Image: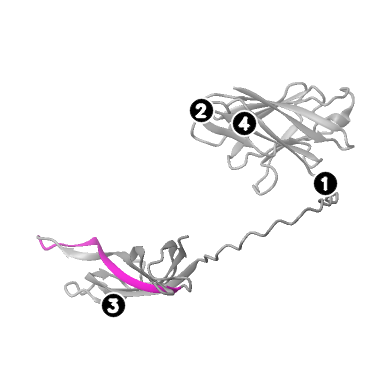
Amino acid sequence: MELYSQLLGIGDNGEVLTAIIDVEILPNSNEAVFMVTNTSPSLPSETNFNIRQVFFNTGHLPIRIKKITQANNASNFNIHKQENMEKDFEYLIEDNTDRGLGPNEKLICTIELDSKEGSEGQSWLHAPLTSINKGMGVQVAATFYNDKGEEADKIGGHYKCRQKKKKYPKPTPPVTTTPSPRPCPVANPQSCCQIIIERKTQLVPPALFNPDRPEQYPVTHKKTFDVAIEKVCPEKVIICGTVHKTIYYKTLKKDCSGDTSIIDHYVKDDIPFQCFIDRDDANENDEFEIVGAAFLCDVFDTPKNFGYHPEFSQYPVAWKFEEKEILKVCIRKVQ
């Protein structure tokens, strides 16, 4: 598939530079060939219309310029890679002499996309700041796709001038009759409650845990919750719910042959909670809805009640798991 786009730039002394980029995307591969042709309207002897810089910026798709050649004269362009991707370009092709790329001369670049997948059916190359003689007033953005469908053969160009626009005063609007103001909407704020949830869970069988070396036998947990509106009373909305926790740890097990092994184990625990939210506009059996609920903070979660296993005294264990967190629930009245 072949595509093309036109670039504009400004020379050192204000000359208008133009160039055409022909792009040939190789199907089922990760390579494309860019051919930059200087189409500036000047005589070959006028070096002020020579192009000395070409910029490539591919957005979030990493590329590398694999090869660069010149069709009309000896190669005099070097490739520079910008390490800081926050800058305006990823690759800069710059003339290393005073000559540059003259009118009607061509610069050919082979670009390789850093991807293990083929390009068929995918967005292949995005060049939002591909330009010539960057910083001289005009840049162009071009997007190239190797895809099937209506968008496959299209190139989008966005021209943006860096010069400040002149500001003109806004015209004074004609005097008109002021329409009647609309009635103020009824306030329907979001209201929230916060609940401290604290729980001590018994670990049976006990968890292997060394308080001096907690990373030796780690104890972890996962949690989810259910929440609902239980009742709407005058000026109060009652919230209820349950936190579901699963605690994962390692423990000891003796098999039928008398051998002892360390196995993975887990314990589940359900923790109910309640709160109420003050709402001056709440009447009994009004309809409210929950618009948000989340854990705000894990205050602590740690094993407790340390000791040694009753059957295997050389193993340190923990008999409880204590935790505290803050849960926030928000509601809004259904209009």
* Mark 1 and mark 3: Cα distance apart in space: 73 Å
- The amino acid type of the residue labelled 2 equals Glu
Earlier residue among tags 2 and 4? 2
Image spot of residue 232 (x, y percent): 38, 70
Q: Residue at x 87, y 24 (%)?
A: 42
Q: What residue is disc 1 on?
A: 165
| Left or right for 128, reference 313 | right
Q: Nearer the viewer, mark 3 or mark 4?
A: 4
Please tell me in which quadrant of the rendered image residue 4 appears: top right
* Mark 2 crowdedness (10 Å alpha carbons): few <14, some 14-19, many ≥20: some
Query: Over which residues does the magenta segment extend?
Result: 257-278
Image spot of residue 297 (x, y percent): 45, 69
Q: What residue is disc 4 on?
A: 144
Q: What residue is disc 2 on?
A: 120
Q: Is 212 drawn above or below residue 107 in the view shown?
A: below
- The amino acid type of the residue labelled 4 equals Phe
Q: What residue is disc 3 on?
A: 306
Q: Is 272 drawn above or below residue 12 in the view shown?
A: below
Q: Nearer the viewer, mark 1 or mark 3?
A: 1
Q: Is residue 100 visible?
A: no
- The amino acid type of the residue labelled 3 equals Phe
Earlier residue among tags 4 and 1? 4
- Given residues 18 and 69, the one toward you in this image is 18
Image spot of residue 56 (x, y percent): 68, 37
User: Residue reaching furthest left?
Assistant: 256
* Mark 2 and mark 1: Cα distance apart in space: 42 Å
Earlier residue among tags 1 and 3? 1
The answer to whether the residue labelled 2 contacts the one labelled 4, judged by CB atoms less than 8 Å apart, is: no
Q: Nearer the viewer, mark 2 or mark 1?
A: 1
